[in-house]
Image (cartoon, rainbow, N blue to C red):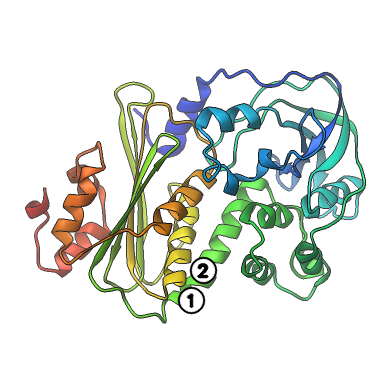
Amino acid sequence: MISGKGEYLRRLTSGMRIRSVEVGKELDGSTPPSVFIGSWNYPKVFAGPMIAPSHGDTSMLDMPESWIPGGMSTDDIVNFRLNLVRGKQTVGITELDGRLAERLRDIALSDGSVESEAVFVHAPRGTSFNDDHPPHGPSALMESFDVGNCRWDHHLEKSFYDTDLRAADAVRELYDNEVPFSRIQKAFSVGAFGFSRKRKLVPTRWSITACDSALGNQLLEEVRHYPVIEGYRVYEFNSLHNHYSVILLPTAWQFEWMEAFLHILGREEMLFSDFERNCGKKGYSSVGGCYYSCRFAVLEALARLGRQAGAIVLREAYEGYVPLGVFNVRENVRHALAGPGLQFNSFRVALEHAALGLRLPLARFIRSSTLFEDHLTGRQRTLASYV
């Protein structure tokens, strides 16, 4: 019996045997730029660069925002991500003046790929698949590591030297200056933002959620002041063995994320969900970082429209699905909401349309939902009338 999403994804990834790049104890190549900071043994963590065994512009290997517009398939993404070799050394999260932290900062703030070289304790091996961050290839402890000359991105450099600016405000300022989310998150992870005395390294998976959450919270403060949409809207998008359906409701802000994993390991139909009402969410989501990535993408679209709404987002993952990180959710929901969508005067008709794109009966989502029931009850309808 699978007790939750975390256990289900561990079972899904444990059976993956995908061959990654083979390198020896010495690697001379290019980092996209890319760094990775682990969470194991926090506050002493494994941190280091991710280097491709090739030279020149490798930025595509760690720029998730470009993968869906570039028409990348799951196989494309997995194949080139497994060309990234992770080097690691142990470092304390507050040791920002050490040589390792300085080199990682140079990489994370660089405006382009950086020539790099590493000597490992042994030949790197293995792969990593995770629902929070994109996969990467083999890893090993490093004996030494160095980078070539690099030039910092001027927006990131400005935020780094502003030691009186809160980290959350730095993230928002960079977002407003159209710095890609992935670049902001990497700089956040190497302790490049915030008051000088509070800066520290942040594990990669935590930094992704922190940036999604910070941007979402700030956008929500704006969205709360916008007029509520009229009618119901449905937006849909398919990619990377996923289907997304975003249903906007003519209510004050509320949000529910529901995801179904269908027949990926066998005949299973797993459904996980979490929600918040208008007062917001307390505590970390039971479904992990994808909750915050989706929430940010929805609030970004509402801020762009200058409207407020409730949102219920349905995701189905099908055979062939591979955990690629929460970018998969953020960027797919962004693409869904960038389309024109369809408008309906009736909640029932909006649901009937959304059901056409789903493989799981809509009744399954409704029975597992909190906001569906809230909305239906508020309109003096019974759940049975939609099932």
Relative to residue 126, is residue 307 depicted above or below? below
* Residue 199 position by quadrant: bottom right
The three-letter amino acid code for the residue at tag 2 is Asn
169 lies above or below 100 = below
Query: Within 10 angstroms of label 2, few (less than 14), some, or many (20 or more) residues?
Result: some
Can residue 39 be spotted in the picture? no
Quarter holding the N terminus? top left
Counting from the top left corner in percent of width and height, residue 113 is at 79, 44
Q: Report if the CB atoms under discs 2 and 1 are less than 8 Å apart.
A: yes
Q: Residue at x 44, y 31 (%)?
A: 321
Q: In which quarter of the image is residue 156?
A: bottom right
- The percent position of residue 68, horizontal first and vertical second, equals 52, 43
Q: Residues within 10 Å of mark 1 (few under 14, many from 20)?
A: few
Residue 187 percent coordinates (x, y): 73, 56
| Residue at horizontal 79 percent and vertical 20 percent from the top | 23
Q: Name the residue under label 1.
A: 221
- Residue 295's x, y, as percent? 45, 59
Residue name at image x 36 percent, y 31 percent: 318
Indicate left or right for 349 with 117 as reference. left
Which type of secondary structure does the marked residue at label 2 adopt? helix
Q: In this view, does 213 lie above or below 32?
A: below
Q: In this view, does 17 lie above or below 317?
A: above
Instruction: Report if residue 228 is visible in the image.
Output: yes
Q: How far apart are marks 2 and 1 (CA)?
A: 7 Å
Numbered circles on residues, count? 2
Q: Which residue shows up at 85% across the image and 55% down it? A: 96
- Mark 1: amino acid: Glu
SS of the residue under disc 1 = helix
Query: For residue 320, which quarter of the picture?
Result: top left
Q: Name the residue under label 2.
A: 217
Of residue 302 and residue 134, the one placed in the foreground of this image is 302
203 with respect to 198 (left or right):
left
